[in-house]
Image (tube, rainbow, N blue to C red):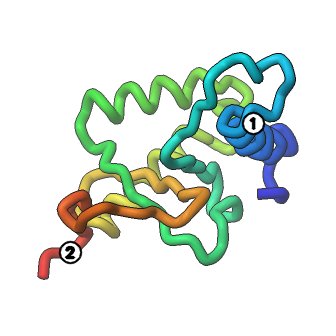
Amino acid sequence: MENQHPDHARLGQLVRDACRLARYGGVRELRRAPPHAIEQLFYYAVTPEAEPPGLTPVYIDVSAPEILKVWTVAMEAHATQAASRNYVELQLTRARLRGLRVGVGHAIALFPNEPLLLDSLAQVGRAARQF
């Protein structure tokens, strides 16, 4: 999202561009390498304002203590963010609220670059509610 830190917005564009170039061999120095395609590209929104409008996120359950610990340590490694606005607390609170929304302890939201395509409904995991 353009209203976020300029480095983050630009990096997101660079990642999309790099994926496309890897797939189609668009860089002269890489043309000898075989094409490489990824199946899906997801983005993480640091703030609610960065969430892409009109896209339904995919929620990832990060409730397991070992996962939550590793994620927290990773966030704390971002010294500039951790020093401002209680970054780690903000992200943990957002994850807790998302977790409550979908019925787990903590969840993060990832936003797909393209619509998800499944071969079968059997690939779909659990839903936030049981019917």
Whether residue 8 is situated above or below residue 51 in the rendered picture: above
Tell me what residue is drawn at x 59 percent, y 31 percent: 36
**Tag shown at residue 7:** none
Taking the image as shown, residue 57 lies to the left or right of residue 18, namely: left
Which x, y percent locates residue 103? 24, 64
Q: Position of residue 83 (x, y in %)?
A: 69, 31
**Does the CB distance between marks 1 and 2 fall below 8 Å?**
no
Q: How many marks?
A: 2
> Which of the 4 image quadrants contains residue 19?
top right
- Pointer 2: what residue? 129
Give the residue number, with chain letter if any, for mark 1: 21
Specify the quadrant that holds the N terminus: bottom right
Q: CA distance from mark 1 to mark 2?
A: 40 Å
The amino acid on which the numbered mark 2 sits, given as a three-letter code, is Arg
Residue 82's spot in the image, x, y percent? 64, 32
Q: Is residue 22 left or right of residue 38?
A: right
Where is residue 97, by image quadrant? Answer: bottom left
Residue lying farthest to the bottom in this orientation: 131
Vertical position of residue 45 compared to residue 116: above or below: above
**Residue 20 in view, yes or no:** yes
Residue 92 % position (x, y)? 45, 46
Q: Nearer the viewer, mark 1 or mark 2?
A: 1
**In the picture, which quadrant includes the C terminus?**
bottom left
How dense is the environment of label 1, judged by Cα within 10 Å: few (below 14), some, or many (20 and up)?
some
* Residue at screen point 55% across, 31% down: 75
**Residue 84 can be seen, yes or no:** no
Q: Secondary structure at mark 1?
A: helix
Say which amino acid is labelled 1: Leu
Q: What residue sits 24% from the left and 64% below the top?
A: 120
The one of 12 and 82 positioned closer to us in this rendering:
12
Residue at 62% across, 41% down:
86
Asked whether 19 or 12 is in front, the reply is 19
